[in-house]
Amino acid sequence: MARLPLEGVRIATMTPVWAGPFAETLLADWGAEIIKVESRQYCPQGTRGPGPRHPKFIVDMVTGHWSAYLKEGYDEVNGRPWNRSCYFNPHGRNKLSCTMDVVRPKGREMFKRLIEVSDIFFESNQPHVMESLDLGYNVISQWNPGIIMLQMPSFGQTGPLKYYRTLGAHLDSFIGGNYVRGYIGRDVSSSSVVYHADETSGLTAAFIMLTALRQRKRTGKGVYIDMAQVETAIPHFGEIIMDYTMNGRIQGTWGNRDPYGALQGCYRCLGDDRWVCITIRTDQEWESFCRVLGNPDWTRDEKFSDSLSRWRHHDELDKRIEEWTSKHDHFAVMYVLQKEGVAAGPVEHPDDAFNDIQMKERGFFEKITHPECGTHLYPGLHYRMSNIPNHIRSAAPLLGEHNEYVYKHVIGVSDEEYAELEREGHIGMDFVPGLKQGKYKPE
């Protein structure tokens, strides 16, 4: 197999939730060695912790803070639920996990040794976490002058909102996502939770780390990166921002419609909760759409004669279109319209994606066996490269699964040191009873 392009790049990380881990996934997929530094002593504020509670969940008897999907018949009492999180495992692939208690002096020394042999240190916690641990760039760069360090809190490392606590849903609200995403006639409380900033931040972080590697190669110097998650998502509302700055207009909710003139909607189809999205932009597409319907008399009405007229009579057209779509399967509607050059696509249920012929043909979902979750299909790589065959190489790591490799082979501790660290509780594959919560404070 050809070497992956990022082989030889080592990245030490402390990243909770989704934005940071998504960036890790993108880099790990193409060969970077991602070493997740986790603590056994502190309740994780991320995806090993609380997760979805449907259709089935568990709460661990020791901590009361863990939940995960389970198979029927799984041992709910003696298992390790932190290894079975449906949030953590899909984006945990191809990564390594080690446990270090960086709050204590010996754990801090082990972390220092890891930084000394790493190319990048990447973290996505609230700013107070690294400050409490005294692990800012001023310290990290002394340990390794060539290190690239990326910090990506919600609002960056400066400004009055620096210490504000958020998740992606709050950032979506902050940039106006909740305000413009919804249905006409409803207020913002009807909008669903969206974590768009996590996706944009993860993608941007992966890109900027590659950029920093290139810069270090050119200059020989380390790089510090201060990246605010909110700033990665604002440009995705570019046309809304420009409309305000140029015209003074504040966009409201448009539901499924296109504010710029296209006929666009989501229409009920045959079956229970089945829908199809259709967009008609030009007169040619309208004629094609009418031809599929058999050119009924109403399509020749003067008020539907051009794009602007159709847009102005959108409500009436929606009723006419749904009269037709409601008699047909949502996939059948897509196929017949696409054949005539009209953009259309079904609203799929989650299980539809696993059975989608396009996804199957491209081999997107890959079958992965996890030691505690069994064998399942997981979303695969996001893109392919010519001459570099690539697939998911390993399932998400168990907590501390790679302790021996990291300690003995990466940072070079002796067998005696390793045994002592185990006795002191730094190294292990279980969280300790009575996990601490709150700010990290070094001893």
Image (cartoon, rainbow, N blue to C red):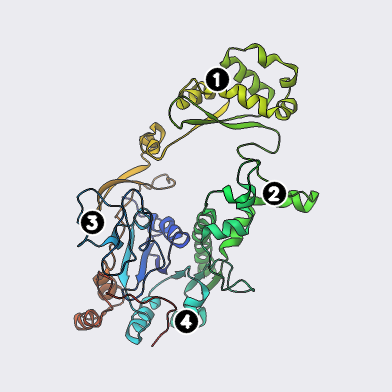
Compare marks 2 and 3 and give the one earlier in the sequence.
2
State the residue at coordinates (40%, 72%): 118
Image height of 154 relative to 262, above or below = below
Compare marks 2 and 4 and give the one earlier in the sequence.
4
Label pair 2/4, CB-CB below 8 angstroms: no
Which of discs 1 and 3 lies nearer the camera? The answer is 1
Quarter of the figure with residue 420: bottom left
The secondary element bearing badge 3 is classed as: loop
Q: Amino acid at mark 3?
A: Glu
Residue 278 x, y percent position in the rendering: 57, 29
Query: For residue 372, which numbered disc appears in the image?
Result: 3
Question: Which residue is labeled 4 in the image?
Answer: 132
The residue closer to the viewer here, 340 or 27, is 340
Q: CA distance from mark 2 to mark 3?
A: 46 Å
Q: Amino acid at mark 2?
A: Ile
Report whether 306 appears left or right of 268. right
Question: Which residue is labeled 1 in the image?
Answer: 324
